[in-house]
Amino acid sequence: MFIIGGSLGLDRRVLDRADYKLSFSRMTFPHQLMRVILLEQVYRAYRISNNEPYHK
């Protein structure tokens, strides 16, 4: 499960329960754009881990 925080971040209780924390940037992205960026990175990792081409 992935949880995307808002522009003010996440509540400390959420962060304390997380198994892993991932930051893409110190910049603030629109929520919808961050979902696309996250999906692309998961897809990229899947392709690379299965020894499949990612780029042309």
Image: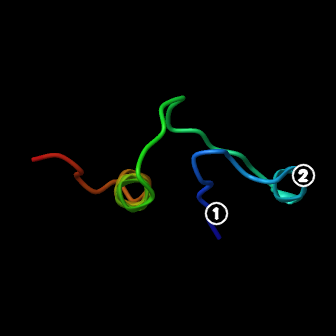
Mark 1 packing: few (<14 Cα in 10 Å), some, or many (20+)? Answer: few
Q: Residues within 10 Å of mark 2 (few under 14, many from 20)?
A: few
Q: Is residue 6 left or right of residue 20?
A: left
State which quadrant residue 5 falls in.
Answer: bottom right
The picture quadrant where one finds residue 35 is bottom left
Q: Position of residue 30 (x, y in %)?
A: 41, 52
Q: Residue at x 83, y 59 (%)?
A: 14
- 3 or 7, which lies in front? 7
Which quadrant, please, contains the N terminus? Answer: bottom right
Quadrant in the picture for residue 11: bottom right
Residue 23 placement (x, y as % from top left): 59, 39
Taking 46 as reference, is 41 above or below it?
above
When the figure is inspected, residue 36 is found, relative to residue 1, above or below; the finding is above
Does residue 49 appear to the left or right of 19 in the view shown?
Answer: left
Q: Position of residue 13 (x, y in %)?
A: 90, 57
Secondary element at image label 1 = loop
Which secondary structure, mark 2? helix
Residue 27 in the image: state x and y as whole percent.
Answer: 48, 31
Disc 1 marks which residue? 3
Q: Amino acid at mark 2?
A: Asp
Please give the label number shown on residue 16. Answer: 2
Q: In the orientation shown, which residue stands out farthest toward the top?
A: 26
Q: Which residue is rendered at x = 34% and y = 56% of the image? A: 40
For badge 1, the amino acid type reads Ile
For the point 61% across and 64% down, which residue is it? 2
Say left or right for 18 vs 43. right
Q: Tell me: 30 left or right of 3.
A: left
